[in-house]
Amino acid sequence: MSVSLIVGTPKGAAILKSNDRQTWSEDFVLRGWPVTASVRDDKGRTYIAVNSPNYGVALFVSDDLANWKQLDAAPRYRPEDRGNPEHHRLVAKEDFGGILKGGGRFVDQIWTLHFAHGALWAGVSEAGLFVSRDYGKSWQPIDGFNEQPGRENWAPGFGGLGCHTILTDAANSNRMWAGISAAGFFRTDDGGKTWAPKNKGVNPAIDSAPASTGQCVHSVTHDPRNASVLYRQEHRGVHKSTDGGDTWHVMEEGLPVTELSDGHHCSFGFASAMDLKSGDVFVVPLDGDNFRFPRNGQLAVYRSRNGRSWEPLTTGLPDNCFTAVLRGAMSADQMDPGGLYFGTASGAVYASADRGDHWSEIATSLPRITSVDAYVH
């Protein structure tokens, strides 16, 4: 079987292909479009999300990863929806048309795409959820999420208010999770009508008063077939839940712990991924929110095989590296043995065909990498 990677950058998408996961070809498509996310549906079609300060958010679709057609529709808020002033301030540098001056709520980026139970989901910025049940021909807002009580207290992260994580339960289409920087992690059990914050045990939450907003979730991963076991890479550490997010506990044995700018000690990072066949989980720690590069310059992926502790994987990775791996820039191909891929903010892509034991650089000199998605043919 062959593997294709869609590597999103601010200047287009690199399409990397391999028949043996050893040698790779490279093509660069959608040139000039900032590419932020991709997904494949149950018909084998691949969708790519793009955004532009001049043309707005759009979706392209392809059956062969070579020929791309822009869809007519994309997620859009209603004209009367009001936006978050602090989010407006943070993204105003790209607001060349001055559309934010009116105070509206706008989709300025699609952070993630997710396909499950016959539906195509989009997590967007300004933070919200949209769904398409006709393969991208039309989009509907999830009002239970987008208008939920407490939204007025959401505070943007450094990049604004972004819904960057969507997870689903393979056995229950009514059960979903969504992660927002910097509002926290939420779950619905009724198909999106109502949502509850799921941050109990994540610092600074305490058992007696779990935080309802304010957690800066970076990424969350799980196996949809065992959906209640979740692994969460948070601004303030790595956590695990075994009850669908109702409670969390710190899971950092073996990870490098650093001091954050506010004095909190934890393992800081952005990306996470899971190999579903083995259950192995992967994160890429960085040296705190001050430096945001690998500890001592050694780029390392950490793996947990038992859901309790972590081991560093560095064979083939550079030891003089001062870049970062962003939240959407890691993916697993779910083959056997499992392949793992990630891209860096300095434009390099690394691949492993043995669940992280050995790594090789398969692309370089790309623009800043914001997303990596692996697809098997």
Image (cartoon, rainbow, N blue to C red):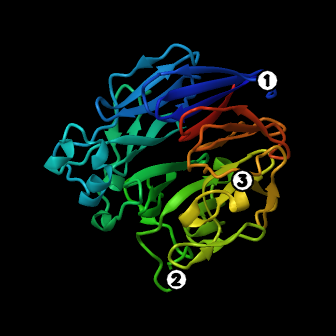
Which one is nearer the viewer's eye here, 289 or 50? 289
Residue kind at label 3, given as amino acid type:
Phe
Q: Position of residue 333 (x, y in %)?
A: 71, 36
What residue do we see at 84% from left, 41% from top?
354
Q: Position of residue 277 (x, y in %)?
A: 79, 44
Amino acid type at mark 2? Ile
Q: Quadrant of residue 242?
A: bottom right
Pointer 3 residue:
282
Mark 1 vs 2, N-terminal side: 1
Looking at the rendered structure, the kind of residue marked 1 is: Thr
C-alpha gap between disc 2 and disc 3: 27 Å
Q: Is residue 351 left or right of residue 155?
A: right
Q: Which residue is mark 1?
A: 23
Give the distance between the C-alpha atoms of the residues marked 3 and 1, in whole angstroms. 23 Å
- Residue carrying label 2: 206
Q: Earlier in the sequence, mark 3 or mark 1?
A: 1
